[in-house]
Image (cartoon, rainbow, N blue to C red):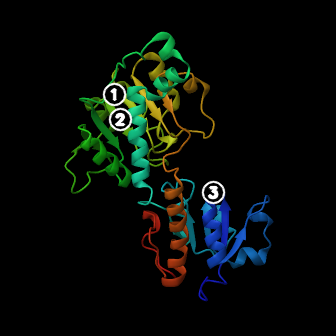
């Protein structure tokens, strides 16, 4: 705690990493939301709150309830739970936690791809169930990574980290973004459907929000084809989940590996029943090392804002804001 920040009230909203609470309590005056939410806070407390460390929905009502709010520091690289446009209109800075989780999520994406193509979880179950001894070797897998061409939907920090790994593994790499990325040699496709038709492995890394809502739809999956493998490490909302279930069931694509879902933690029973779906419970960045680094960045952004009037990782919508 510094003399400059010790009296600044920071709201802790949502179930974030415990280290966020520890550091906020050490360096600021921490205010926790009880079961009654912001409405349960007395007016003097609400008017005193100048910052928020969040892993919860931040909408217009949230911002309007805190008239002195200057900054929302969000835990995670995705921030679709924060109405950043409204925050910008109210001169409220919004930050997230990119970079510190990129390599960890990329590791998970590649592991999920290998598990999906080579059926490693099913092979392990074969062993554990005694079938290796009883029935012999696990059946040869129909799919392989050899000769595959990956298309990355969302070549940002995480997408680039995935691309580097796949390239080192001998896979061809293409990508689709709203616009080409400067300084990369990977082939760019202006259309997601065109890219799906050109590759056999589609990896979605995009954030949630209106721009990506159900972008991976029946047409994209059909274009990916019967040897196609779909991996989602970004947001579940970017996929038409029913269309994916139908594509997996009908053999429109070969397999899918998913770490994210449309309505977490509720995974459709139809997905759980599919043998060609490899499913993880949103563990992309779930190591103690990386989550602690994310927690530190949440608080470092708050400290930087109140000490220097700048932040380390602003989201694009509020990147130009300055302290009043």
Q: State which tag comes first along the sequence, 2 or 3.
A: 3
Looking at the image, can residue 11 be seen? yes
Looking at the image, residue 224 lies above or below residue 139? below
- The residues tagged by marks 3 and 1 sit, at their Cα atoms, a distance apart of 35 Å
Q: Secondary structure at mark 3?
A: loop
- The residues tagged by marks 2 and 3 sit, at their Cα atoms, a distance apart of 30 Å
The residue indicated by pointer 3 is: 56
Q: Residue furthest bottom?
A: 3
Q: Secondary structure at mark 1?
A: helix
Along the line of sight, the residue nearer the viewer: 50 or 116: 116
Residue 300: x and y in percent read 51, 73
Q: Residue furthest front?
A: 133
Estimate how packed mark 3 is, as few (under 14), some (14 to 19) or many (20 or more) residues with alpha carbons within 10 Å. Answer: some
Q: Residue at x 52, y 40 (%)?
A: 260
Q: Given contact means CB atoms under 8 Å apart, are the residues at marks 1 and 2 in contact?
A: yes
Residue 202: assigned label: 2
Residue 107: x and y in percent read 40, 46
Q: Residue furthest left?
A: 185
Tell me: 197 left or right of 302.
Answer: left
């Amino acid at each position: 705690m510094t003399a400059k920040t010790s009296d600044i009230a920071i709201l802790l909203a949502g179930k974030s990493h415990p280290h966020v609470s520890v550091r906020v309590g050490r360096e600021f005056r921490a205010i926790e939301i009880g079961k009654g939410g912001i409405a349960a806070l007395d007016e003097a407390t609400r008017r005193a709150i100048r910052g928020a460390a969040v892993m919860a929905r931040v909408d217009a009502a949230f911002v309007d309830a805190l008239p002195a709010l200057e900054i929302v520091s969000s835990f995670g690289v995705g921030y679709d739970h924060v109405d950043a446009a409204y925050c910008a209109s109210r001169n409220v800075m919004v930050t997230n936690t990119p970079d510190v989780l990129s390599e960890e999520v990329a590791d998970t994406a590649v592991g999920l791809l290998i598990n999906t193509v080579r059926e490693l979880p099913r092979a392990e179950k074969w062993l554990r169930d005694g079938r290796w001894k009883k029935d012999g070797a696990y059946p040869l897998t129909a799919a392989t990574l050899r000769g595959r061409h990956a298309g990355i939907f969302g070549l940002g920090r995480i997408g680039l980290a995935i691309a580097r790994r796949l390239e080192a593994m001998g896979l061809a790499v293409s990508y689709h973004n709203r616009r080409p990325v400067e300084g990369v040699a990977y082939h760019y496709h202006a259309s997601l459907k065109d890219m799906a038709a050109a590759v056999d492995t589609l990896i979605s890394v995009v954030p949630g929000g209106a721009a990506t809502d159900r972008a991976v739809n029946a047409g994209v999956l059909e274009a990916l084809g019967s040897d196609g493998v779909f991996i989602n490490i970004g947001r579940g909302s970017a996929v038409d989940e029913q269309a994916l279930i139908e594509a997996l069931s009908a053999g429109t694509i070969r397999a899918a590996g998913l770490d994210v879902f449309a309505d977490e933690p509720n995974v459709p029973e139809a997905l759980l029943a599919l043998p060609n779906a490899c499913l993880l419970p949103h563990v992309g960045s779930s190591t103690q090392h990386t989550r602690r680094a994310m927690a530190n960045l949440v608080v470092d952004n708050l400290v930087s804002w109140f000490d220097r009037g700048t932040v380390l990782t602003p989201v694009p919508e509020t990147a130009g804001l300055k302290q009043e």
